[in-house]
Image: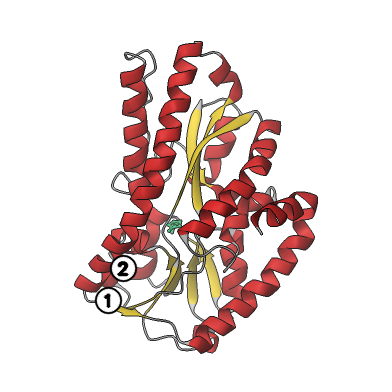
Amino acid sequence: MPTPYPDKTFHTVNISEFAKDVAVATDGKLDIKLHTAASLFKHGEISKAVRGGQVPIGEFFLGLLTNENPAFGVDTQPFLATNYDDAKKLWAAQKPVVEKLLDKQGMMPLFSVPWPPQGLYTKKEIKTVEDLKGLKFRTYNSTLEKFAQAAGAAPTQVAVPDIPQAFSTGRVEAMITSPSTGANSKAWDFLSHYTDIQAWVPKNIVVVNKRAFRKLDKDVQDAVLKAAAAAEKRGWEMSMAETEAKVKILKENGMTVVTPSAELMDGLKKIGTQMLEDWKQSAGSDGEAILKAYK
Ligand code: PCA
């Protein structure tokens, strides 16, 4: 099972628990071996590897598939769902469409877990959108890339394990990510301000190859589904706990945690509104169904 993020990431910890639960429930009949931190496949290759059956199961950032279909990345739309309650509602609205799209590719979702709300990391205080102009900006999917571009910044995609090096070599100088990824990357080594903009609550997803799943005995299938449901519940709770714990660590390590100015939020939300309009255009009837169910 390939996963993209390092061992200490709470998503990875949750998945280890999931694998253990499956092994225990099946008396070792199904033993899931994790290959973390993109060690088996690069992050961008994981969904294809599951789809093609090179691996039976894998984890990836759902919004990475935005280019395949905008519905996959609705949870990375700026300011559409910015807290856990709304994120839960958005997932309920998005899930049937994600299931349908993955099914066409021979895959099935097992569980999905959110990252904490996304905040802004910089080397100085950011009071307005204009302050972001020209900054070399680390991104992780095409939606964030558009957002950074619309704010006048210069986006560059960098995978989580490469964040410290990208900052230390000056390839990037700002980013939007969770307190989790910020703290795990020791953001204080190269950044000073964390502005709590709570811009969106994006998710990782664990998917299986349907053919591989069908080959399992019925009791093993049931054990996997049961462990998956438990992992989704546990993962959401871990994510909520993570938010507070990791903001505290940012502070303890000397980062200035800033409540965003009204002016900054207005400017960023204006970009979000325009991006949602564009998203609606590209997401068609699936997009409409998601937004209708969410509202
Ligand atoms: N961490 C991952 C995805 C979202 C998050 O909080 C990243 O920065 O790539």
Kind of residue sitting beneath label 2: Ala
Identify whether 106 is placed above or below 5.
above
Task: Give the label, 2 or 1, closer to the camera.
Answer: 1
Residue indicated by mark 1: 255
Point out residue 30 in the picture as x, y percentages from the top left corner: 39, 17
| Front residue (pair 129, 270) | 270
What residue is shown at x 36% (from left), y 32% (from top)?
Answer: 18
Number of labels in the image equals 2
Kind of residue sitting beneath label 1: Met
Point out residue 26 in the picture as x, y percentages from the top left corner: 36, 15
What residue is shown at x 41% (from left), y 59% (from top)?
Answer: 116
Q: Are marks 2 and 1 in contact (CB under 8 Å)?
A: yes
Identify whether 137 is placed above or below 76.
below
The image quadrant in which ligand 1 is located: bottom left
Query: For mark 2, does the 10 Å Cα neighbourhood hold few (<14), some (14 to 19), or many (20 or more) residues?
Result: many
Point out residue 93 in the picture as x, y percentages from the top left corner: 63, 49
Q: Considering only order in the chain, which callout, 1 or 2, is on the residue closer to the N terminus?
A: 2
Res. 64 mark: none
Judged left or right of residue 66, residue 32 is: left
| Front residue (pair 80, 42) | 80
| Front residue (pair 236, 45) | 236
Q: Residue furthest left?
A: 252
Residue indicated by mark 2: 187
Judged left or right of residue 100, residue 21 is: left
Secondary element at tag 1:
loop
